[in-house]
Image (cartoon, helix red, strand yellow):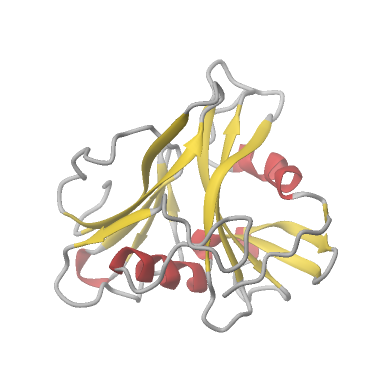
Amino acid sequence: MAVIHHTTLKPTKLELLSSWLPSRPWYSGGGGGPELAKVGGFRLDDPEGEVGIEFMVVTDTSGTHPAGYLVPLTYRGAPLDGAEHALVGTMEHGVLGRRWAYDGCHDPVLVAQLTALIEGRVQAQDQSTSDTPDPEVVHSYIGDGLAPTDFTVTATDDPEGTELPAPRGTVLRLHRVLRPAPDNAPLPPHALGHVAGAWHMPDGTRARGLFAVLSTGPRA
């Protein structure tokens, strides 16, 4: 299990995201820059114990209407070869030293563990407490056998999310722009599995919605 260090980060994660988010095609905030708050998320464990994996939910109140975004991040102790385009930034960790933060959709460790979560082979972990499962994160899988693991990490962004294709037409889609929906809401057509979770809305209420969908076609 990953150990959560309660220590300083310079710059903070939200400071890194404030510079990076406006460059994303799914970001719709105001022109003056994001006004971010961390409102939810969860973690996954790297089996090798080397890479930090976090699915962070942030709310941006800089636009006309507040917007919630899913930001999967990985934290590494050295640069990830070939992923310069996915670097969110570097920060100094009070315990671990310099950390390289990446858009996790381009990191094969995060993609493999997200697939394992959809299948139920791993468990989502609390975002802030070591060795503590997060019961609010739910998943499903109805595929035959194991899901593909050979997703390309050349992810494609669009105005709503990020897609990662695999051979034979399977697609893993992450919902970057979050929309509240009940747990019993129908999944998109051709869905093989999903991950859903919860976050806080600006008015203090608790919302739930889809984080990721595994399907046999695009735009799930």
Residue in the image at 75% along x and 67% along y: 99
Is there any visible trace of residue 154 in the rendered image?
Answer: yes
Residue in the image at 22% along x and 38% along y: 185
Residue in the image at 69% along x and 29% along y: 35
Judge whether 31 appears above or below 75 on screen.
Answer: above
Q: Quadrant of residue 161?
A: top left
Left or right: where does residue 63 sit relative to residue 137?
A: right
Q: Quadrant of residue 61?
A: top right
Residue extending furthest bottom? 48
Quarter placement of the N terminus: bottom right
The x and y percentages for residue 100 are 72, 65
The x and y percentages for residue 146 are 24, 77
Q: Quadrant of residue 19?
A: top right
Residue in the image at 29% along x and 68% along y: 119
| Front-lying residue, 158 or 99 | 99
Residue extending furthest top? 64
Left or right: where does residue 110 sit relative to residue 146?
A: right
Is there any visible trace of residue 26 in the rendered image?
Answer: no
| Front-lying residue, 73 or 152 | 73
The x and y percentages for residue 162 are 42, 50
Judge whether 39 appears above or below 124 on screen.
Answer: above
Q: Disc count in the image?
A: 0
The x and y percentages for residue 28 are 53, 29
